[in-house]
Structure formats: structure tokens, C-alpha cells
Amino acid sequence: MIDLVMDSHSKIAGVGELSHYCKHLPTDEPCSCGERLKNCSFWQKVFKNIDCSKLKIFYRSGVNFLLNKKKYLYYAGKEKEFNADEYVRLIEKVYKNILFYSGKEVVFDSSKDPDRAEAIIRFGKDLDIVLLHLVRNGKGVSYSNIRLGRSSFRFMKKWLFLNLKIEIIKLRNRKVKNIFVSYEDFTKNQKEVLCYILSSFDLLFEPEMLNIRNYTHHQPGGNFKLRITEKSSIIKTDEVWKTKMSIKDKVVFNTLFGWLNLFYKIKVKINYGK
């Protein structure tokens, strides 16, 4: 949702999880504008002369990440080394195309891959990067997966490790500006949080940002136009986990992972002086 809001700013192009574009293209997933990706004129222009075969999803092993080694591997298939430098050169071209064809000044890339983010920080010599760390209450994330029939403990661990990974990246890339935002705070104090984010780009809040239905958006693999309703376009906090999550799962989370939730609550108070 935050990507759609940012995309509604006159100077910002919100493009969803851009890292998944080449994954969605072969199956011709929908763009949030309502067209299929292969028929979306915006993405056709942006990716013209861009080789999608070189924009695969990649990762680093846990050891290589902790040692901060430049050894990246393809996410799927054989353990083949991935050329992250070449990847970032192509992403720079994609970003430039997005700015050119959107007529905007800032690309808001909502990809959630820490290894990709650090590779872009490391190899993106011509990019002025601001890292946005958006965090949702870990119990909310866990319950969202529990109600889909997934393992609760697995996703509790995933939430913890993902956020710790991002914290490490922020620590060892101190020269790169980073913004911390709480999902719950964003849904409850939209204008205040948006002003905080926009200040990092030297931009001002625009009230029309909150009227996301008034704009045509281009998020790869998004189905905004296919499912959005007047009611669902209202930004609100999803806290159903408070009443639906089992006591057992709450106890497990609070005991093993609750300390990071508490850390982020304190961080929100420091950020906004609450």
C-alpha cells in the first residue's frame, strides 16, 4: 500500500517489487494499471533493450553475508555464481528509463531483498540511494502466514532474520541514508509518516497522495485495478492477530522474538518523539 501512496506523489514513481518483474513477465502477470505486463506500454518502454535473463533473483549464503563477501549465487537452480555488478548496471538503466518515461524524479522500488539492496548500494556508483526499512509487528506478520496454513515458527524466524539482516546492512553502510518506518504507525499517522519519509528526498507532502484510486499505477504482478474497491482503498491497520492469534503462538513469539518488537517500538518513539 505504501508504494501506491508514494506513486501518487507528483515527483515519485512507485514501481512495486521491481526485482520480481522478470519473474512475472513469462507468465504475463497483470500490472496494477489493469493491463498484462506484455501489453503495458509503460513497462514495454522501460524494458526495451534490457535483457531480463540477466536480472535473475540472487542471494548470498549466510557465511558470505556475515563476512560481507561479494559472492552472489542464483536463487534457483544450480549453485552458480551471479554477476551482481552487471545486474546493478542494468538496474541503473531500468531506473533511468523509469524516470524518463514517468517524468518523475525519484524511483520508489519496494523490493524486499536485503542482498539485492546491499548489492545496489555497493555497485550503484551513479545512484543516490535512500534505504527504507518498513517493519510490521512480528506477530502480525506471523499470523498472516498462520492463517494461510503455513508454519508459525518458520515465519517468526524469517521475520527475525530478515530484520536483523537489514540492521546489519544499515550498520556497515553508514554513509547511505536510511529511514525506519513502522507499518502500524504509517496506517495510523499517514501524513506524519509520509512527511518524515519525503523529507529525505527534500519533497513536501501532497494531500492527493492518499487518493490512490485517482492515479494509474504500474506495479509488476499487481492486481490493484482488478480487486480494489472504495472500502479496500482506505488505509487501515490490520490487527486481527490480536484476537485471532492463539495464546500458544503469542507466547512463543514473545519469548523468543519479542525483544526485537520491543526494540522497534522504542525506535518509533525516538523517531517521532512520542
Image (cartoon, rainbow, N blue to C red):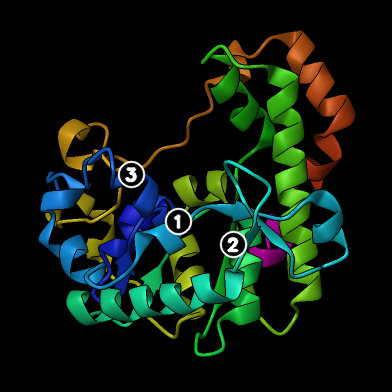
Q: Residue at x 39, y 46 (%)?
A: 23
Q: Is 251 situated left or right of 78 in this image?
A: right
Distance Cα–Cα, label 2 vs label 1:
8 Å
Q: Residues within 10 Å of mark 2 (few under 14, many from 20)?
A: many
Residue ID for mark 1:
19
Image x and y of residue 203, in percent: 39, 81
Rendered view: 261 above or below 209: above
Residue 24, disc: 3
Tag 2 near tag 1, CB within 8 Å: yes
Rendered view: 4 above or below 244: below
Q: In terms of depth relative to the viewer, which is nearer, 274 or 116?
A: 116
- Specify start and end residues of the magenta stretch as a single range: 267-274
Is-magenta flag for residue 272? yes
Q: Residues within 10 Å of mark 1 (few under 14, many from 20)?
A: many
Q: Is residue 272 visible?
A: yes
Quarter assignment of residue 34? top left
Q: Residue at x 69, y 9 (%)?
A: 246
Quarter assignment of residue 218? bottom left
Image x and y of residue 98, in percent: 28, 73
Instruction: Name the amino acid type tagged 1.
Output: Ser
| Sequence order check, earlier mark of 1 and 3 | 1
Kind of element beneath mark 1: helix
Instruction: Name the amino acid type tagged 2.
Output: Arg
